[in-house]
Image (cartoon, rainbow, N blue to C red):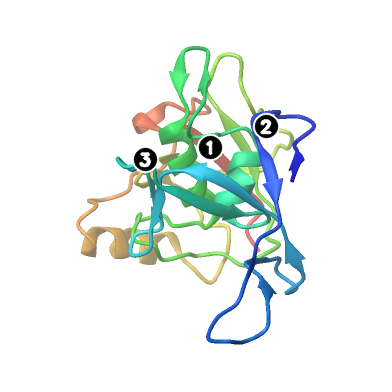
Amino acid sequence: MSQSASLPDIYFTDIDVRLNEGKWESLCSDGAGAPTSAIVVPGYFDLATADWRPGEQGELAFACRGTAAGKCLEWGYRMWAKHGGVSLADHYRACTRMVRADYCGTNVPHTENGTPIDISDGLSPAILAPETDWQIEAKWGPHGAVCLNQPRKLEHTRAAVVAECEAAGRGKLPKCVDDDPGEHGGLLVSQAEPS
């Protein structure tokens, strides 16, 4: 077990599992299939919705490094923490939706591994601030995008994503107008160069 240098309340651990008398293998692997560590978190992940839940009976879950669940923790959106007196649980949920481009909050991703995004929040002080002048892609709440401009992957048109969200009962996604992360109730902002 090792401790994060920048966030001392995060610990990385290697976990091996063996299924059906097979060989021991790492529970976590990166995008290339190489073993990686996990972060133990309170609560559990709902497999149907990919949403984190706090749990009620001391449940523990594993967030693998390099996944949306792990990246959001390492970026500072730890669901058990507070920042400036604000709980980060909903920021964590918004972050995992954002990383996966799960615009409608239906556990349907609209991106590919390795697609760069620039992330910022409206916290005071901010955990992450914009580092590029890329256009605003979307603003995010715990249940998906709260407004949307051009999706980060050009194969997904704004019109198609808006229709998908309407069909899922999310209502119509407005366009994002200003730089305020809180527009339409957003917690995080993603900026991207559509590709």
Tell me if residue 139 can be seen: no
Q: Is residue 24 above or below residue 145?
A: below
**In this rendering, position of residue 41 left or right of residue 171:** right
Residue occupying image coordinates x 26% and y 50%: 172
Q: Which residue position is annotated with label 1?
A: 189
Per the image, label 2 sits on a secondary structure element best described as loop
Which is nearer the N-term, disc 1 or disc 3? 3
* On-image quarter of the C terminus: bottom right
Q: Which residue position is annotated with label 2?
A: 130
Residue occupying image coordinates x 57% and y 57%: 152
* Picture coordinates of residue 68, whole percent (x, y): 57, 53
Residue occupying image coordinates x 70% and y 69%: 31
| Nearest the eye: 191 or 157 | 191
**In this rendering, position of residue 95 left or right of residue 185:** right
Contact between labelled residues 2 and 1, with CB atoms less than 8 Å apart? yes
Q: What type is the residue that disc 2 sits on?
A: Pro
* Picture coordinates of residue 98, whole percent (x, y): 51, 49
Q: Is residue 76 above or below residue 147?
A: above
Q: Which residue position is annotated with label 3?
A: 54
The residue positioned farthest toward the right in the image shown: 5
| Nearest the eye: 143 or 44 | 44
- Comparing marks 2 and 3, which lies closer to the viewer? 3
The residue positioned farthest toward the left in the image shown: 169
Q: Quadrant of residue 94?
A: top left
* Picture coordinates of residue 3, whole percent (x, y): 75, 37
Q: Which mark is residue 35?
A: none
Contact between labelled residues 3 and 1, with CB atoms less than 8 Å apart? no
Per the image, label 1 sits on a secondary structure element best described as strand
* Picture coordinates of residue 164, whole percent (x, y): 31, 65
Q: CA distance from mark 1 to mark 3?
A: 24 Å
Q: What type is the residue that disc 1 sits on?
A: Val
